[in-house]
Image (cartoon, coloured by chain):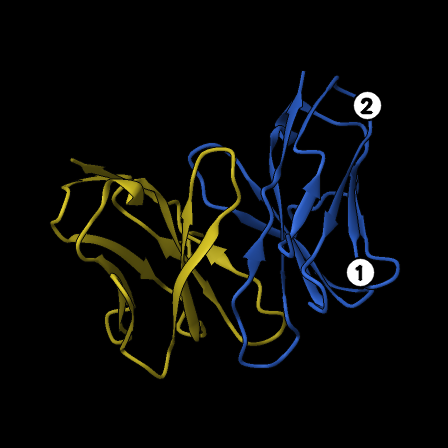
Amino acid sequence: DQQVKQNSPSLSVQEGRISILNCDYTNSMFDYFLWYKKYPAEGPTFLISISSIKDKNEDGRFTVFLNKSAKHLSLHIVPSQPGDSAVYFCAASALSPGGKLIFGQGTELSVKP
Amino acid sequence: DTGVSQNPRHKITKRGQNVTFRCDPISEHNRLYWYRQTLGQGPEFLTYFQNEAQLEKSRLLSDRFSAERPKGSFSTLEIQRTEQGDSAMYLCASRPGTSGVETQYFGPGTRLLVL
């Protein structure tokens, strides 16, 4: 039972353009969502998060949008840079009981110069 | 460096051997999590501690796996009688216990290869 899904295994974008990564979830008990970036042979690095009481959170070039009715969130990166090339994971948690994260399968972003 | 650290970074072992991994969380983070990641998948939750208490274990954590956090600081994950299916990246993460602070910070992981 995949509670968090990233249906696009890969995405290729031109440098300077917008990258949009999508994520869907099924469990309405999730109340916190996070995006992580991962390079090969390294642990995930936290990027940005959003609480379920909000529909948008912005941090520099990164914006996360949450559509609770559709159980969908997206990460926008503008403008995309070659250094953004990595695997991006969305994750969800419920505050109770322990805040464990449920991850999607990841989307590999390639930003071409 | 005040991030999460994990040792060793790589481990190659033969089937049937026991292995132990160590995680040192960020200071004063009283929640510590273990995850496992296999190729092409996202990290999967294994277990978590609040201070020294192990509060949740995934059904992925068979009886060959044991985790400890004896003094509420570092944690160890031991796999007994390793199998080839145990080959994966083992990730540790920590976060404050404060309610509303949900972000977990990950270490670099330990990559295990069972031959």
The percent position of residue A46, horizontal first and vertical second, equals: 45, 58
The percent position of residue B84, horizontal first and vertical second, equals: 65, 23
On whether disc 2 and disc 1 are found on a single subunit, the reply is yes
Q: Residue at x 27, y 78 (%)?
A: A55
The quarter holding residue A9 reads: top left
Q: Amino acid at mark 1?
A: Ser
The quarter holding residue A56 reads: bottom left
Q: Residue at x 45, y 40 (%)?
A: B41
Q: Toward the viewer: A9 or B2?
A: B2
Q: Label 2: few (<14), some or many (≥20) within 10 Å? A: few
Residue A87 visible to an observer of this rendering: yes
Q: Chain in blue?
A: B
Q: Chain in yellow?
A: A
The percent position of residue A30, horizontal first and vertical second, equals: 44, 71
The residue sitting at the bottom extreme is A53
Q: Toward the viewer: A83 or B7?
A: A83
Mark 2 lies on a secondary structure that is loop
Q: Amino acid at mark 2?
A: Gln
The percent position of residue A50, horizontal first and vertical second, equals: 37, 73
Q: Which residue is mark 1?
A: B73
Residue B57 visible to an observer of this rendering: no
Q: Which residue is mark 2?
A: B17
**Relative to A87, does residue A92 appear above or below in the rendering?**
below
Q: Is residue A34 left or right of residue A83?
A: right
